[in-house]
Image (spheres, rainbow, N blue to C red):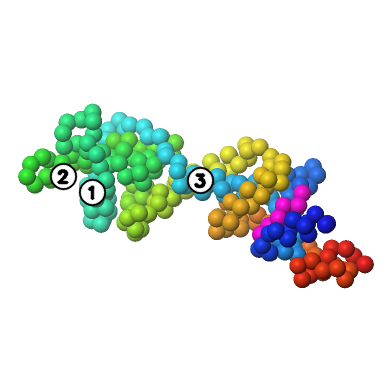
Amino acid sequence: MSNICNESQSKSSDDYVPVGVLSQSDNWICQQGTHIFLLNPHRINEVVIYRRLLESFQFQTESLETPIDINECLLGDVNLWKTLLALETEQEKEMFPGYRKITDHRIIANGFHIVIFTEQGSSPEVKQVQLRAVADSIPTYGIGDLCEVLENIASLPESSSLSQSRPLKILNYLKGEAVRMARKSPLFSCREEIAELLESSKRLKTSECLHSRPFFQKLYDISSLPFSQTTFQGESQLFPK
C-alpha cells in the first residue's frame, strides 16, 4: 500500500496511477486519489486505435467498370454540387488537358477517385464529373456515401479534419478494424506501458470502449478504511489501526 501513496504524491488527484497487474489477468489495479479502480487496458486501446484510424486511414480504391457521371441531379442538392466543384484539384497526368482529379484528402482517404473535365477557354466551364473508383473493402459503397461525405464537408469549417468527414459505413468499418487490431495487440506487461495508455486516454473525451463498456470499474474508496493518525496529502495514511 505504501507504494501507492508514494507514487501518488507526484500525481494530480485526477490522474490514474497504475498499481499492478492482477495475476492470471490482463486487468490492472489503478488509483485515483483515494479511490481504487479496476482497469481494462484493451478497452482503452481499441478506442485509441479507432481514433488513429479515423484521423489517418486511407482506403484503397478499385476502378469501376463503368465510371459514374456525377451531376447536381444525381447528388440531389445544389449545395453538395457546389461543395464538390469547390474542392482542390490537380491536372490528371495520364489524361488530356482539362481533366483534373480531386485531391482533397477528405475525398481521397474516404475512398473516392473523382475526375472533373473542364472545357478550356477564356471562361472555363465544367463539362463532366466522373466517379472512376471507390473503396474496394466496403460493400455497396458509392454515390450515397459520397453525398454523406460532401454533407459533412459542407457543414464544417474549411480546415475540418478527415475524421469529421467520415460517412457512417466507414465509421462502422473502422470500429470493426479497431476491435480486431486491439485483440491482436500484445499484452500490456509493464507499468510504463499502462501509464502511457492512461495518458492517451485523457485525449479521448470518453470513458467507454466501442461497445459502451467502461474503461474503469470502481472497487474501493480508501478513505472508508480505519486509519492511523499519520496523514498523507491531508488524508490519513493507509495503515489500519
Residue 218, can we see it? no
Q: What separation in Å lies between label 1 and label 3 (alpha carbons)? A: 29 Å
Q: What residue type is labelled 3?
A: Arg
Task: Tell me the residue that label 1 is attached to.
Answer: 85
Residue at (23%, 48%) from the top-left corner? 85
Q: Nearer the viewer, residue 168 or 229?
A: 229
The earlier-in-sequence mark between 1 and 3 is 3
Q: Which amino acid does label 1 sit on?
A: Leu
Q: In this view, does 210 lie above or below 180?
A: below
Q: Quadrant of the N terminus?
A: bottom right
Span of residues in magenta: 15-20
Element at badge 2?
Answer: strand
Q: Quadrant of residue 225?
A: bottom right
Q: Quadrant of residue 56?
A: top left
Residue at (24%, 50%) from the top-left corner? 86
Task: Tell me the residue that label 3 is attached to.
Answer: 52
Instruction: Decide: few, some or many residues near mark 2? Use Cα within 10 Å; few <14, some 14-19, many ≥20.
Output: few
Q: In the image, which is nearer the foreground, mark 1 or mark 3? A: 3
Q: Are marks 2 and 1 in contact (CB under 8 Å)?
A: yes
Q: In this view, does 188 lie above or below 239?
A: above
Q: Nearer the viewer, residue 56 or 12?
A: 12
Give the main secondary structure, helix, strand or loop, of the magenta stretch. Answer: strand
Task: Tell me the residue that label 2 is attached to.
Answer: 126
Residue at (36%, 32%) from the top-left corner? 62
Element at badge 3?
Answer: helix
Q: In this view, does 33 lie to the left or right of 154?
A: right
Q: Does the magenta stretch include residue 19?
A: yes
Q: Which residue reaches farthest left?
A: 122
